[in-house]
Image: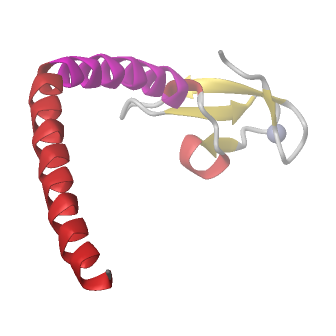
Amino acid sequence: MIKTQFCPRCGGLMKPIKKEDGSTILKCSKCGYELTSAGAGYTVGVQTSSSDRVKTTSVISEGKKVGRKKEEIEQEKEEYYKELFLELLHEEEYGGEET
Ligand SMILES: [Zn+2]
């Protein structure tokens, strides 16, 4: 998951270094050039946390779907019949006018 990156300045190997505030940056082992994850699209920490988040959200949404399905179906049914009823009314009205 950790991609090897090279220093844009000297081409040296960039090593991931964890900062005191918890963020991971890349530091060149040759010239000491620092690359922050925000500026360079470096995704060591971000990748793991985002995949974790995707997992959790998918589980949560699945649970929601199961819980909401019954209500949704009921609502859909109601709306379907309502529309059908209105359509029938409409057809009768228009049918009467046209012929
Ligand atoms: Zn460098």
Identify which residue is drawn at 15% across, 65% down.
Answer: 89
Front residue (pair 30, 17): 17
Horizontal arrangement in the rendering, residue 64 relative to residue 26 (left or right): left
What's the image's color scheme?
Answer: secondary structure
Identify which residue is drawn at 15% across, 34% down.
Answer: 72
Instruction: Give how far across and how far down residue 75 sits, in percent.
Output: 11, 39
Instruction: Give how far across and how far down residue 60 sits, in percent.
Output: 24, 21
Q: For residue 23, what is the image quadrant?
A: top left
Q: For residue 99, what is the image quadrant?
A: bottom left
Image quarter where ligand 1 lies: top right
Identify which residue is drawn at 45% across, 28% down.
Answer: 50
Residue 59 drawn in magenta: yes
Q: Residue furthest front?
A: 99
Q: Is residue 12 above or below residue 67?
A: below
Q: Main secondary structure of the magenta part?
A: helix
Front residue (pair 56, 78): 78
Front residue (pair 41, 73): 73
Q: How many marks?
A: 0
Residue 54 drawn in magenta: yes
- The residue range painted magenta reads 46-66
Horizontal arrangement in the rendering, residue 52 relative to residue 97 (left or right): right
